[in-house]
Amino acid sequence: MTKSAEPDFLAGVRREIAHLSWLVGSWTGFGVGDSKTPEPYRYEEIVEFASDGRDFLEYRSVMWLVDDEGNRIAPGRTESGFFRGLADNHVEAFIAHPTGLVEVSMGQVVVAGLENAVITDGSLVLRAALLRNTETGEALDASTRMFRLREGRLFVAHDKAAPGESERNHYAIELVRK
């Protein structure tokens, strides 16, 4: 068997997902959300993207509601899934929620900054191609997630629409790498 002259790994991940390498790590921060509550809520979130050497990233997000001082007061949203890289910087994401909802989303990474073969400025917009809920699960008509790396910070926003409603921002957060 002949080995390829090209390395199998770039930026610490398989070549097939090198365009997602800027997401890898553990990120944390505080944000503001709006879920049809009388007042917007504050929350803390930890987002993790990890690679075990295969051609996908594992994704996990855990959120807590916080008070004005940033103290955790109640558990919030949690979700997990996988991001797979496709040709031409395209991405498939599969995200499951304990509320009985599964999202299959498609998007494309746009690289705006590259230094020494490391992505320093990039973005990814994922639009749900399929939203399925269990019989008692959360139902959605639309979901759009935006990820943006800029100046070492990861900005994340999620817009979604409940059945019969217009898509609107659900939460936005600025995260720093732990």
Image: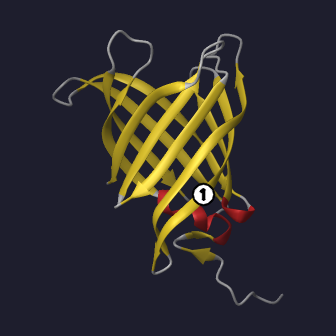
Point out residue 51 in the picture as x, y percentages from the top left corner. 56, 59
Q: Is residue 166 left or right of residue 177?
A: right
Q: Is residue 52 visible?
A: no
According to the picture, the residue beneath numbered tag 1 turns out to be 109
Q: How many marks?
A: 1
In the image, residue 120 sits, relative to residue 30, either above or below, namely below
Circle 1 SS class = strand
Residue at image point 70% right, 90% down: 5
Which residue is situated farthest in the left direction here?
69
User: Counting other residues with Cα less than 10 Å from the Cα at mark 1, is it few (<14), some (14-19), or many (20 or more)?
Assistant: some
Residue at image point 43% right, 56% down: 149
Point out residue 95 in the picture as x, y percentages from the top left corner. 62, 37
Amino acid at circle 1: Val
Q: In front here: 169 or 139?
A: 169
- Colour style of the rendered protein structure: secondary structure
Residue 45 lies in quadrant: top left
Q: Is residue 170 left or right of residue 41?
A: right
In the image, residue 140 sits, relative to residue 107, either above or below, namely above
